[in-house]
């Protein structure tokens, strides 16, 4: 008898039998009677191994002996993940399902900073991730943010962007420092990083078309100068249009595994989501940063309605430690690259796909 608990963003490793790891990209799945799935051989082991080496260099890359339906059925994660006996199997599986939708590119980079609050710690690592709409800005985007009474500076900027109703062409995410209760001008720091992204990408709409997110230590000032002058330019230089896996990896903080989900619609459009979070799990919305990308053609109002409903059915439905985060952000962006002849039918199918990705 299985117990499935949708507790998005836990580290998601449950040891029930020796040598078996239960790993879920967006949800925690516990089983009282654990058993291994029958896994199909990969269609292209070399391709997957290359993907893993490029986008998950921290994992040892070997030709996978086990690849499930992600490779077999066109590159999607399963509604319920199978079991993985090694990290390499998990990373191979995620690689096979990580293809970006049309019109998207992601890039990541690392840098260092010295905390103003704790200089004795010396240089500390920080990562930046850029998600870019390669063919121009889109009006088709939606977001849900934390309801915490003390939101971080990126939340304030994000709410302003959403309420302003303007288009979006990029998202920038940093880990290590959350830019919450920083003691400085956190909004100005977030805007500085957005300006650096706009400059590096030559965005005609400027920084107003960039959405910032931060995650990490509360109470530290964001190292905005280091991000703007070092990390962001390198992240933009590394932009690629193949896989979302490196972005899923580099937004992590205390997560042990990157979290990624994907679903392909009947017209060929894809919904791909990446997320991070492992603590401060409480309804409204559970601690997370979650970024959903699709090349489906769908209007802004429809996206907001579907996203809000999906958040209520997934991320708003769980609690672990009773701590509501100050940084919760879920964003969905549509590049509108795949046309549709039946908007009503697409909305129904898209809603099902979105729920599968977010509950996965």
Image (cartoon, rainbow, N blue to C red):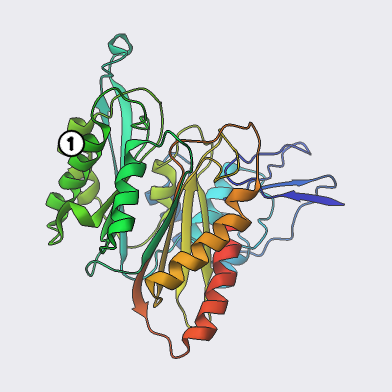
- Residue that mark 1 sits on: 230
Check the image and report above or below for 290 versus 167. Answer: above
In the foreground, 56 or 313: 313
Query: Which residue appears at 25% of the width and 19% of the height?
Result: 114
Residue 249 placement (x, y as % from top left): 43, 44
In the foreground, 285 or 57: 285
Label 1 secondary element: helix
Q: Is residue 343 left or right of residue 86?
A: left
Q: Is residue 244 left or right of residue 207?
A: right
In the foreground, 102 or 140: 140
Residue located farthest toward the bottom when viewing the structure as drawn: 341
- The 10 Å Cα crowd at callout 1, few under 14, some 14 to 19, many 20 or more, is some
Q: Is residue 24 left or right of residue 190?
A: right
Residue 142 placement (x, y as % from top left): 40, 61
In the foreground, 26 or 282: 282
Q: Which quadrant holds residue 295? A: bottom left
Query: Which residue appears at 35% of the width and 75% of the height?
Result: 336
Residue 359 placement (x, y as % from top left): 62, 57
Q: Which quadrant holds residue 108? A: top left
Residue 334 placement (x, y as % from top left): 37, 68
Query: Which residue appears at 24% of the width and 25% of the height?
Result: 184
């Amino acid at each position: 008898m299985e117990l499935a608990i949708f507790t998005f963003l836990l580290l998601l490793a449950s040891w029930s039998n020796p040598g078996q790891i239960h790993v879920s990209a967006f949800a925690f799945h516990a089983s009282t009677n654990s058993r291994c799935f029958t896994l199909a051989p990969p269609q292209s082991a070399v391709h997957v191994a290359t993907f893993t080496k490029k986008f998950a260099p921290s994992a040892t890359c070997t030709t996978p002996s086990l690849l499930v339906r992600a490779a077999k059925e066109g590159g999607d994660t399963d509604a319920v993940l199978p079991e993985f006996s090694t990290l390499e199997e998990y990373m191979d599986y995620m690689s096979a399902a990580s293809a970006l939708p049309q019109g998207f590119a992601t890039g990541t980079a690392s840098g260092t900073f010295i905390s103003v609050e704790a200089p004795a710690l010396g240089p500390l690592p920080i990562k930046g991730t850029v998600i870019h709409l390669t063919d121009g800005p889109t009006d088709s985007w939606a977001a849900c943010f934390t309801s915490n009474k003390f939101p971080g500076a990126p939340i304030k900027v994000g709410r302003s962007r959403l309420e302003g109703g303007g288009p979006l062409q990029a998202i920038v995410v940093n880990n290590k420092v959350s830019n919450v209760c920083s003691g400085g001008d956190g909004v100005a720091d977030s805007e500085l990083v957005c300006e650096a992204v706009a400059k590096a990408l030559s965005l005609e709409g400027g920084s107003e078309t960039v959405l910032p997110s931060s995650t990490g230590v509360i109470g530290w000032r964001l190292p905005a100068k280091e991000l703007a002058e070092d990390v962001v330019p390198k992240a933009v230089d590394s932009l690629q249009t193949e896989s979302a896996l490196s972005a899923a990896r580099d937004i992590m903080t205390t997560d042990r595994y990157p979290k990624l989900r994907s679903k392909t619609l009947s017209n060929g459009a894809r919904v791909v989501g990446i997320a991070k979070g492992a603590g401060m799990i409480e309804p409204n919305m559970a601690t997370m940063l979650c970024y959903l990308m699709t090349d489906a053609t769908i209007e802004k109002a429809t996206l907001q309605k579907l996203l809000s409903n999906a958040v209520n059915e997934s991320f708003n439905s769980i609690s672990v430690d009773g701590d509501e985060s100050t940084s919760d952000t879920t964003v969905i962006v549509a590049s509108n690259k795949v046309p549709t002849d039946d908007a009503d039918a697409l909305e129904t199918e898209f809603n099902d796909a979105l729920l599968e990705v977010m509950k996965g």
